[in-house]
Image: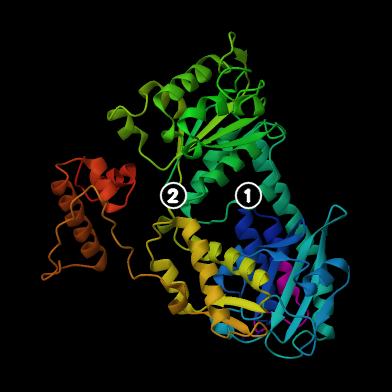
């Protein structure tokens, strides 16, 4: 338990610290984190959390003393009556150890604070900004009686500074958005919550999305299966000047070749057997807005030619029609393939590739996002806790390490399935819904390393001898093994990088990047 040894009894030092932070320029995340860290030390409690109201949910923006995945959770007020009660009142709200209402943080206090133990004392207050409810501040402790009348009075005294910090953070976020949009009425801070992640790769991607969103340039989203390309397409549209108009999603892989042209461009009556009337296509449905072409590499060459004409001239021609129609549509395309390789083998038009990839945006795979895997796991843990009616659902320290270590060939989609499956297993094996349910690594069903798939058309890769492990650090040994595996795949497939990538279960562009990092190619 953190002891209140750094501050005098009147709390003047904490006041000075909070006021000093208001006077300096700090990134929003750091400003809010310093706030909760300072309050946790001052009140000598186990955990402090700052949560922002978004619709019917409360979203943690900064926490101190809670498990890492807490930032990824979204707390439904319908599911968490304590939080709803705090938000509904303007005064300090306390829940003592004998309260019948479940605590949203049961089992979520950090390991150093006794992670699997229930919370015994809770204090919170609603936060208001510009006359509107903004969210809540909560403080939790394992020791009964931590939040006595004196502690409640201190929190009431600090409330104006807490709300001033929140208001300043919001204003700073709005100013950054206005600078990026040049006064064009940009998106709110809340839209940043659509994409969970704090890794450098995600931060860089979000910045690029914000910059390109307000242009009409075509964007090509590149990434492996399961990285969330559709989510990023929705974010691009939401940040654009077209956000009030439709976003139309087309899964090109699900379009039968015989119907793809009609689906995209429409048809007139009598254009083909069964065409009993005129029908607009997806381009016309997206008029003024955005058309998202998912798995664009699956389109036939004939449809690619018509798509190219639309991108060049802003015109479509319904199947069977005599005259073209003007359309005003922004195109966002996505693929998990290397379109450059398809251009080389003739299955994708080079001119269309260059039209679509005016602004290519690679989405990092989950294995390159560090601790983001735990934030995402927190989101899926809370969803499954609510779905299964559990009091609390958390990961053991060993399970967290297993998630960080896994290769994630299926990316975020695979993580969602892993958490859902593990939660169901725990319940099926007798876990009580009234207990704090902890998921161990044995329930996650993860291999130590992701298997290397072999395509049916390729020969098995030769086994890399492991009798003499390379000397050096673990990083050096892993790099040496990766070099051997890539060389072996290239040998089997006659130096064809695309076939080698498929045999290794990688996207060709990612294999090229890896090879350059390993100094296997210039």
Label of residue 192 in the image = 1
Start-end of magenta stretch:
4-16
| Residue 91 in the figure: left or right of residue 169 | right
| Residue 308 in the figure: left or right of residue 6 | left
First in sequence, mark 1 or 2: give its number: 1
- Direction front: furthest residue: 273
Q: In the rendered image, which quarter is residue 106 located in?
A: bottom right
Q: In the rendered image, which quarter is residue 305 located in?
A: top left
Q: Please tell me whether residue 249 is drawn above or below residue 6 in the rendered image.
A: above
> How packed is label 2: few (under 14 Cα within 10 Å), some, or many (20 or more)?
some
Nearer the observer, 432 or 156? 432
- Residue with the mark numbered 2: 225
Residue drawn at 61 percent across, 74 percent down: 66
Q: Position of residue 519 (x, y in %)?
A: 20, 47
| Residue 95 in the figure: left or right of residue 28 | right
Q: Position of residue 33 (x, y in %)?
A: 63, 64
Residue drawn at 35 percent across, 70 percent down: 447
């Amino acid at each position: 338990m953190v002891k209140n040894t750094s501050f005098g009894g009147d709390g003047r030092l904490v006041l000075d610290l909070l006021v000093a932070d208001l006077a300096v320029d700090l990134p929003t995340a750091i400003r809010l984190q310093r706030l909760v860290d300072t309050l946790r030390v001052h009140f000598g409690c186990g955990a402090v959390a700052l949560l922002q109201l978004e619709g019917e949910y409360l979203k943690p923006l900064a926490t101190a003393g809670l498990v890492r995945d807490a930032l990824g959770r979204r707390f439904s007020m319908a599911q968490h009556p304590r939080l709803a009660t705090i938000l509904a009142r303007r005064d300090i709200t306390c829940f003592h150890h004998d309260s019948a209402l479940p605590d949203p943080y049961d089992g979520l206090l950090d390991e150093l604070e006794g992670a699997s133990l229930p919370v015994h004392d809770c204090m919170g207050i609603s936060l208001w900004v510009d006359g509107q409810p903004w969210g809540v501040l909560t403080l939790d402790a394992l020791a009964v009686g931590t939040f006595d009348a004196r502690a409640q009075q201190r929190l009431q005294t600090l409330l104006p500074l807490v709300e001033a910090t929140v208001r300043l953070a919001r204003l700073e976020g709005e100013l950054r958005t206005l600078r990026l949009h040049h006064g064009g009425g940009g998106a709110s801070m809340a839209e940043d919550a659509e994409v969970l992640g704090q890794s450098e790769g995600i931060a860089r991607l979000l910045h690029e999305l914000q910059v390109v969103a307000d242009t009409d340039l075509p964007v090509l989203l590149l990434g492996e299966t399961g990285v969330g390309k559709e989510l990023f397409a929705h974010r691009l549209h939401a940040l654009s000047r077209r956000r009030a108009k439709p976003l139309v999603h087309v899964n090109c892989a699900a379009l039968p070749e015989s119907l793809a042209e009609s689906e995209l461009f429409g048809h007139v009556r009598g254009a083909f057997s069964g065409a009993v009337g005129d029908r607009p296509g997806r381009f016309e449905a997206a008029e003024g807005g955005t058309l998202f072409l998912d798995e664009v590499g699956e389109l036939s060459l004939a449809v690619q030619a018509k798509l190219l004409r639309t991108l060049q001239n802003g015109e479509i021609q319904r199947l069977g029609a005599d005259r073209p129609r003007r359309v005003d549509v922004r195109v966002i395309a996505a693929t998990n393939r290397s379109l450059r390789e398809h251009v080389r083998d003739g299955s994708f038009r080079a001119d269309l590739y260059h039209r679509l990839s005016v602004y290519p945006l690679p989405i990092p795979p989950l294995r390159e996002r560090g601790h983001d895997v735990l934030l995402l796991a927190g989101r899926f843990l809370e969803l499954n806790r609510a779905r299964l009616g559990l009091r609390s659902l958390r990961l053991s320290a060993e399970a967290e390490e297993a998630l960080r270590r896994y290769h994630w060939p299926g990316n975020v989609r695979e993580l969602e399935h892993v958490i859902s499956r593990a939660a169901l297993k725990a319940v099926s094996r007798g876990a009580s819904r009234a207990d704090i349910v902890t998921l161990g690594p044995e329930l996650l069903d993860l291999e130590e390393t992701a298997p290397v798939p072999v395509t049916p058309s390729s020969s098995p890769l030769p086994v890399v001898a492991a009798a003499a492990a390379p000397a050096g650090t673990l990083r050096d040994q892993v790099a040496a093994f990766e070099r051997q595996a890539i060389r072996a795949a290239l040998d089997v497939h006659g130096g064809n990088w695309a076939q080698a990538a498929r045999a290794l279960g990688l996207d060709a562009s990612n294999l090229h990047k890896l090879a350059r990092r390993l100094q296997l190619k210039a």
